[in-house]
Amino acid sequence: MVVWEQKLYHAMFNALSDAVVFTNCQQKIQLVNAAFLTLFGHAVAEVLGQAFDVLYADRADNTVQATIDDHGDVAETAKPFDVQYRRRDGSSFIGETMVTVVKDVEGHRVGSLVVIRDITARRQADSLLQANLARLAKKHRYEAIISSVAHSVHQSTSLQAVLDHAVDAMRTHIAHIDGIEIFLLEGQEAVLKAHCGLPEWLVAEIQRLPAPQGYTCWRARRRC
């Protein structure tokens, strides 16, 4: 019966799709499953008895051990956290990691069970999504500015009023902005026509500048 149970546990352990590592209280690797061997590319003999930090992309990373220390003797599974790991071939990946304290029948901690899932593709997709959302937000802000200025053009016959309204629109739709300047080309000079957030001494210095390429330019100073 005991032999059958051991075979069953071994089969269940290796059937898990995520990489699983059992370490003792000294963070030495005692057991790994088949998914671990596939993910990391190591042979069993190469990792058994090794310190867990041999798996880190940066061996100075102490994330897993710190999480175990924070656990103390609590048996609940920790919340997932990301760790940068390194495969046998030198490539690295982001592993979503969960650590569970393992106890014996008397309640004494005998080690930790570390479950690792490669989420590199997911994190890359998240980054791409965030970049696309940022681009869409930027596009929306500029469209709002253009719409606001276009409305002003239709509502006013004064060019200065339109430029002033453009400054207001940019301040409304561009976050963390310190100063805006709008220049119009007059001959060989760019003449400051509308602005906000500029000190008087700077306004006096940039009233007329050598003309840039084009007919109109505006510049926004943004805080980091």
Image (cartoon, rainbow, N blue to C red):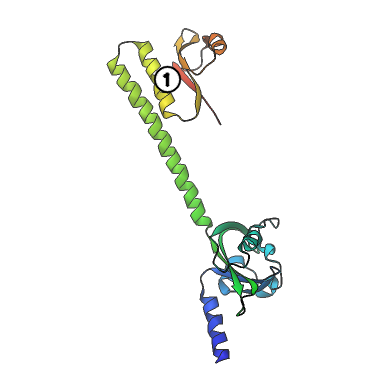
User: In the picture, residue 138 is in which quadrant?
Assistant: top left
Mark 1 Cα within 10 Å, few/some/many (few <14, many 20+)?
Answer: many
* Up-down relation of residue 30 to residue 137 (above or below): below
Which amino acid is tagged 1?
Val
Residue placed furthest toward the top: 187
Q: Secondary structure at mark 1?
A: helix
The residue lying at 47 percent from left, 50 percent from top is 126
Residue placed furthest toward the bottom: 1
User: How many numbered discs, if any?
Assistant: 1
Q: In x, y percent, where is residue 45?
A: 69, 75
**Considering depth in this image, is 179 or 188 the residue closer to the camera?**
179
Whether residue 182 is visible here, answered yes or no, is no
The residue lying at 62 percent from left, 79 percent from top is 106
Whether residue 73 is visible here, answered yes or no, is yes
Quarter of the image with the N terminus in it: bottom right
Q: In x, y percent, where is residue 18?
A: 53, 68
Q: Dot 1 corresponds to which residue?
A: 167
**Considering depth in this image, is 81 or 102 the residue closer to the camera?**
102
Q: In x, y percent, where is residue 2?
A: 57, 90
Residue placed furthest toward the left: 155
The residue lying at 53 percent from left, 84 percent from top is 8
Q: In x, y percent, where is residue 187?
A: 47, 7
* Up-down relation of residue 101 to residue 132 (above or below): below
The residue lying at 30 percent from left, 21 percent from top is 151
Q: Is residue 117 left or right of residue 68?
A: left
User: In the picture, residue 223 is in which quadrant?
Assistant: top right
Quarter of the image with the C terminus in it: top right
**Considering depth in this image, is 69 or 58 the residue closer to the camera?**
69
